[in-house]
Image (cartoon, grey):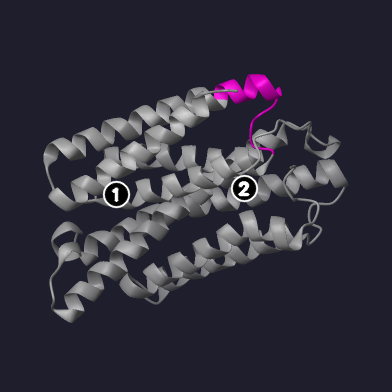
Amino acid sequence: MNMLFPLTYLGYLLATATYLLWFINQQRTARLAARWLLTAAGILHTLNLGARYFEAGHTPISNMHEAVSFFAWSMTWGFLIFRWRYRVKNFGTFVSVGISLLMTVAALASKEVTPLPPAMRSLWLPVHASIALMANAFLAMGFCGGVMYLLQEREIKSRRFGIFYERLPSLEALDNLNQHCLSAGFPLLTLGIITGSFWAKQAWGSYWQWDPKETWSLITWFIYAALLHFRFTMGWRRRRAAIMSMIGFAAALFTLWGVTYLLGGIHAYVG
């Protein structure tokens, strides 16, 4: 059994626990330790994906375990790169919890290496699937920012300043975070749908077949397109933008999981 995945999973759990410790005690040593643990887990995760590639003989994004694992990997490195440019107070705590939840799903899913069906034996697999999952990673970070915004807003409106008020950034900073995540995630989501349509043309002879996953991908796209439109034309910001980001990410998760297990279709993951 490949021990890289269990070690990676453990690394993320330790990073999350340390981030939560930092959130509670606000000691600089805990923050630095959490960041290094998350980086180390990300490196282990990269090695794990490489090992999975050589084991399977194809890009490891073809079943639920691989897709969710890649989702978590994208979110990890998306956050670490994002943090290099935009520093948002205690953002890492919420993101690390999300990553650990994703890794828990990946750990519970079947890890069996299954052969690819003919339609998936294409160069479009790594292109389309990786872009779509990286889009989900940035949209997930937007969701985390939305949760932080609503928590901070509740503290301010109640005038009972508790643990969140002192530890979360200003509402303005969180609204800007929402916009930055959307600015990265929406173009990737769009590109994911475009590359998926080219792959569909190659595999099935049609750019669009209204398969459940295609339909829900389009619904998700329209939610985020509406958010962008309202944000820049009608001044939708702050609470409305946070809630819309959370609704959009719920649609993205349903596209990833709900469609596969409830609606099926030709896009259901192998295994």
Q: Which residues are magenta?
A: 50-62
Q: Residue at x 23, y 68 (%)?
A: 152
Residue denoted by label 2? 192
Q: Is residue 221 visible?
A: no
Q: Residue at x 79, y 47 (%)?
A: 200
Q: Is residue 51 magenta?
A: yes
Depth order, front residue of 100/89: 100
Q: Position of residue 226 (x, y in %)?
A: 51, 70
Q: Residue at x 76, y 43 (%)?
A: 199
The image quarter in which residue 235 lies: bottom left
* Horizontal arrangement in the rendering, residue 141 relative to residue 35 (left or right): right
The image quarter in which residue 262 lies: bottom right
Q: Residue at x 30, y 62 (%)?
A: 148
* Horizontal arrangement in the rendering, residue 64 relative to residue 70 (left or right): right
Residue denoted by label 1? 93
Q: CA distance from mark 2 to mark 1?
A: 28 Å
Element carrying mark 2: helix
